[in-house]
């Protein structure tokens, strides 16, 4: 993934971004439920992580991955401050991590799919780790990802066995939810 500079991580948590991103409502719309195991790809400093944690409850689990050690360290601080205890953090590339096959209920990717260097490898990893009927949610910024690029992303995911189950847009974002084909 391309790296968002960790020294600018305060930008990710600023009140203006929070105002324009209704995290609780978005997570509800994705279909995330209590007890799920979520893989948060490109978690950064944890803009969504506490909300995902609340959504899965004490019986669920969040596995948050980012390439940058500094971002994961900031996320770990947030986890400690907010008392989130069903979390695992991983520093690394999604294509290279070791997760059990079919161990994940839901993959959550917010504003970073376009930064994945090896999209084919990442999509194969998503398919491997998702349980049958597992879901993959991707949100991408319209200012960064134009329509043609979004369509290319959909084709890649569909060619690897994902079924588009829902698609919508807002002023700033595209949202896509896929199901793993059985």
Image: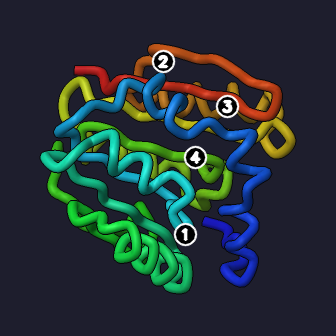
Residue 45 seen in render: yes
Compute the Cα span from label 1 to label 4: 12 Å
Q: Which mark lies nearer to you, 1 or 4?
A: 1
Q: Are marks 3 and 4 in contact (CB under 8 Å)?
A: no
Q: Position of residue 163 (x, y in %)?
A: 42, 18
- Location of mark 4 (residue): 110
Q: At x 61% / y 28%, what residue is drawn? A: 175
Which callout, 4 or 2, points at the residue further toward the start of the chain?
4
Calculate the distance from the C-alpha at mark 3 to the C-alpha at mark 2. 13 Å
Where in the figure is residue 128, as x and y percent of width and height? 26, 45
- Location of residue 13 by image quarter: bottom right
Residue 45 is labelled as 1
| Mark 4 surroundings within 10 Å by alpha-carbon count, few (fewer than 14), some (14 through 19), many (20 or more) | many
Please report the residue visible at 19 percent of the width from the left and 28 percent of the height from the top: 132
* Quadrant housing residue 160: top left
Mark 1 vs 2: CB contact within 8 A: no
The one nearer the camera, 50 or 127, is 50
Mark sitting earlier along the chain (3/1): 1
Residue at mark 2: 164
Q: Residue furthest right?
A: 143
For label 1, count other residues whose C-alpha is less than 10 Å away and answer few (under 14), some (14-19) or many (20+).
Answer: many
Relative to 16, 38 lies left or right: left
Whole-Å distance between the Cαs marked 1 and 2?
A: 29 Å
Q: Position of residue 144 (x, y in %)?
A: 82, 45
The local secondary structure at tag 3 comes to helix
Which quadrant is the N terminus positioned in? Answer: bottom right
Question: Looking at the image, which is closer to me, 30 or 143?
Answer: 30
């Amino acid at each position: 993934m391309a790296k968002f500079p960790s020294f600018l991580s305060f930008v990710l948590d600023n009140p203006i971004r929070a105002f324009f991103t209704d995290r609780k409502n978005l997570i509800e719309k994705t279909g995330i439920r209590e007890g799920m195991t979520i893989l948060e790809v490109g978690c950064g400093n944890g803009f969504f992580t506490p909300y995902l944690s609340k959504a899965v409850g004490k019986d669920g689990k969040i596995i948050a991955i980012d390439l940058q050690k500094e971002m994961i360290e900031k996320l770990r601080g947030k986890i400690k401050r907010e008392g989130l205890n069903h979390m695992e953090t991983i520093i690394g590339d999604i294509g290279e991590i070791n997760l059990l096959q079919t161990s994940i209920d839901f993959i959550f990717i917010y504003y970073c799919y376009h930064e994945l260097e090896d999209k084919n490898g990442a999509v194969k990893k998503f398919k491997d780790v998702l349980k049958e009927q597992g879901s993959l949610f991707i949100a991408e910024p319209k200012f960064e990802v134009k329509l043609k690029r979004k369509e290319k992303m959909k084709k890649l995911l569909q060619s690897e066995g994902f079924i588009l189950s829902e698609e919508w847009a807002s002023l700033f974002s595209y949202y896509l939810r896929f199901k793993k084909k059985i």
